[in-house]
Image (cartoon, rainbow, N blue to C red):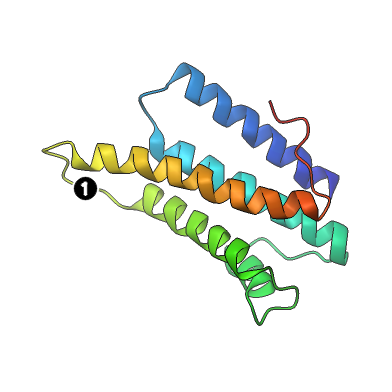
Amino acid sequence: MHLHIEKAIKNCKFLEAIETHLPDDFFEWKITVVFYIAVHSVRALLKAKYKTYVGFSHKAIDNVIKSDGTYPFPLKQYRAYQALYVYSRDARYKVYDDTFGFNAKLIVIKLAESKDQLAVLEDYLKKEGILLSKKK
């Protein structure tokens, strides 16, 4: 559990660093980092609360926390995790013709939405005893 919390905290610090030093670039990687903060936080919860190891795939985590999974999350938090996965996947793999700057604005919005979804998930994790207290 502690290793996943440490990894989530490390990802928080990395996000802060790239946002500070590269505020107007690499939004796709910022979105991806937000997702990996969630991944390691969820893995920490599953290890702490259920003493279970989920495996490495995103599908494995999804199968465990979905509504009919072994350890289902509340619907709102599960949807937040799903949204983070989709935003991250789209940010990594989609490419667009950005002639008019529309997609640049869209990805900034997606980063903000990613942070909002992470906050929803973190509130639940906090109630479950998973704190990213060293995050600053």
Quarter of the image where the C terminus is located: top right
In the image, taking residue 25 as reference, residue 34 lies left or right, namely right
Amino acid found under the numbered disc labelled 1: Tyr
Q: Residues within 10 Å of mark 1 (few under 14, many from 20)?
A: few
Q: Residue furthest left?
A: 99
Question: Looking at the image, which is closer to me, 65 or 112?
Answer: 112
The image position of residue 115, as x and y in percent, is: 52, 42
Q: Position of residue 73 (x, y in %)?
A: 68, 68
Residue appearing at x 74%, y 78% in the figure: 70
Q: Residue at x 56, y 22 (%)?
A: 17
Residue identified by numbered label 1? 96
Residue 17, compared with residue 94, is above or below; it is: above
x and y percentages locating residue 127 in the rendered image: 79, 53
Query: Is residue 66 shown left or right of residue 132?
Result: left
Residue drawn 58% across the image and 64% down it: 76
Q: Is residue 87 above or below residue 66?
A: above
